[in-house]
Image (cartoon, rainbow, N blue to C red):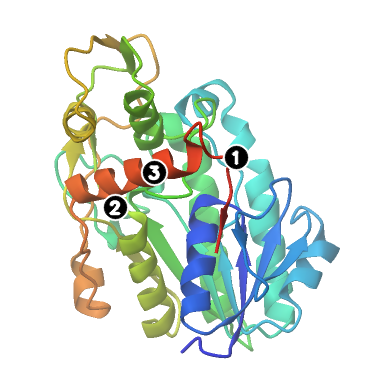
């Protein structure tokens, strides 16, 4: 589907965007990618990088001009601490960016728009995996109220452009579980749980300090598997629809830490759990039956192998011997 097609990856220097750019190149796409404050991490002459601010409508129009497909991977994101202390940081900028690039894509006659939503927008579900139809059954968790409704609002906009206008633009919503792997954000200030935990193990922190009790349960999917699902959704969904892309299995932070320590051979380390720090969602299980049936999606990388691959990549890129923190392909 993507061979020789004009494809925009908005947020091409981010974690998901960088991995998606690599995959689209492998599929033969003509790739344009937006960057903002960060420099590109994938260096390849086949990529057309456009430095722009998606808060500016003219920049959005410039980015989508001539594109057939748009993947909206750009977002103002951060870790639990930032969300807890400044919840609005993820609301206004993202609403503006999402709204403007959708409008710009529509008037540029883009064939299909793919939006990355979030499992954090789902309401509490206890120990039951959440299904796609439950998104609007109740409010999101309080800690994610702002960012959750921002994602929901953009999903409604996707439906508007796909179903409610005279000349519709196909819009696909992908709801990821927690993603990890190469090119993730490993900065302790802005990183998510998996990246921060793996970095502490690799750097031999002693003690290793963990926020919360370590009992939080997460569905974690390796980035290559997520990109598989993202591409399948873009290829096989032809009008508005939303689909979960996840591993379909869940692990506690304690289990994640145990596996990382085992892979690294790091023994006799002190582990300190800080229950005063913000714990986000106690349990988040995700149902992937729809993706399996509709997209024939099945993740290939188990959690242990995914952690091992991520650790290996991190050590290769961020080792003291490495003179650069960019990977050239």
Secondary structure state at the residue bearing disc 2:
strand
Looking at this view, is 20 or 41 the one in front?
A: 41
**Front-lying residue, 251 or 303:** 303
Q: Which residue is mark 2?
A: 221
Callout 3: SS: helix
Q: Which residue is tagged 3?
A: 120
Q: Closer to the N terminus: mark 2 or mark 3?
A: 3
When asked about the image quadrant of residue 210, the answer is top left
> Does 104 sit above or below residue 304?
below
Instruction: Tell me if mark 1 has few (under 14), some (14-19) or many (20+) residues whose alpha carbon lies within 10 angstroms of its own.
Output: few
Question: Image height check: is 156 above or below 75?
Answer: below
Viewer-side label of 3, 1: 1
Indicate which disc residue 323 carries.
1
Indicate which disc, 3 or 1, sits on the residue closer to the N terminus: 3
Compared across the picture, whether 204 is left or right of 249 comes to right
x, y percent for residue 62: 81, 71
Work out whether mark 2 precedes mark 1 in sequence or the reverse, and give the earlier one: 2
Q: Position of residue 114 (x, y in %)?
A: 51, 70
Residue 59 on image: x %, y %: 81, 63
């Amino acid at each position: 589907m993507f061979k020789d097609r004009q494809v925009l990856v908005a947020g091409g220097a981010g974690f998901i965007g960088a991995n998606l750019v690599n995959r689209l190149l492998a599929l033969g796409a003509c790739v344009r990618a937006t960057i903002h404050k960060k420099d590109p991490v994938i260096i390849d002459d086949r990529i057309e990088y456009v430095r722009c601010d998606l808060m500016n409508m003219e920049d959005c129009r410039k980015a989508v001009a001539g594109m057939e497909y748009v993947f909206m991977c750009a977002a103002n994101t951060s870790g639990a601490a930032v969300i807890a202390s400044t919840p609005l940081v993820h609301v206004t900028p993202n609403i503006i960016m999402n709204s403007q690039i959708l409008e710009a894509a529509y008037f540029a006659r883009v064939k299909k728009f793919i939006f990355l939503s979030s499992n954090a927008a789902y309401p509490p579900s206890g120990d039951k995996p959440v299904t796609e139809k439950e998104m609007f059954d109740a409010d999101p968790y309080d800690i994610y109220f702002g960012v959750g409704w921002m994602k929901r609002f953009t999903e409604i906009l996707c439906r508007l452009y796909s179903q409610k206008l005279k000349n519709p633009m196909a819009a696909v919503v992908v709801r990821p579980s927690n993603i990890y792997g190469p090119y993730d954000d490993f900065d302790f200030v802005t990183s998510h749980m998996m990246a921060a935990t793996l970095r502490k193990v690799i750097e031999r922190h002693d003690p290793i300090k963990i926020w919360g009790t370590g009992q939080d349960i997460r569905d974690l999917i390796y980035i290559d598997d997520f990109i598989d699902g993202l591409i399948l959704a873009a290829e096989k969904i032809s009008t508005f629809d939303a689909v979960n892309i996840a591993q379909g299995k869940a692990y506690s932070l304690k289990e994640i830490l145990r596996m990382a320590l085992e892979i690294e051979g790091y023994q006799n380390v002190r582990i300190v759990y800080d229950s005063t720090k913000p714990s986000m969602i106690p349990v988040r299980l995700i149902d992937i039956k729809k993706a399996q049936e509709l997209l024939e999606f099945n993740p290939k990388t188990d959690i242990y192998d995914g952690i091992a691959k991520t650790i290996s990549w991190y050590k290769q890129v961020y080792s003291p011997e490495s003179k650069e923190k960019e990977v050239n392909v």
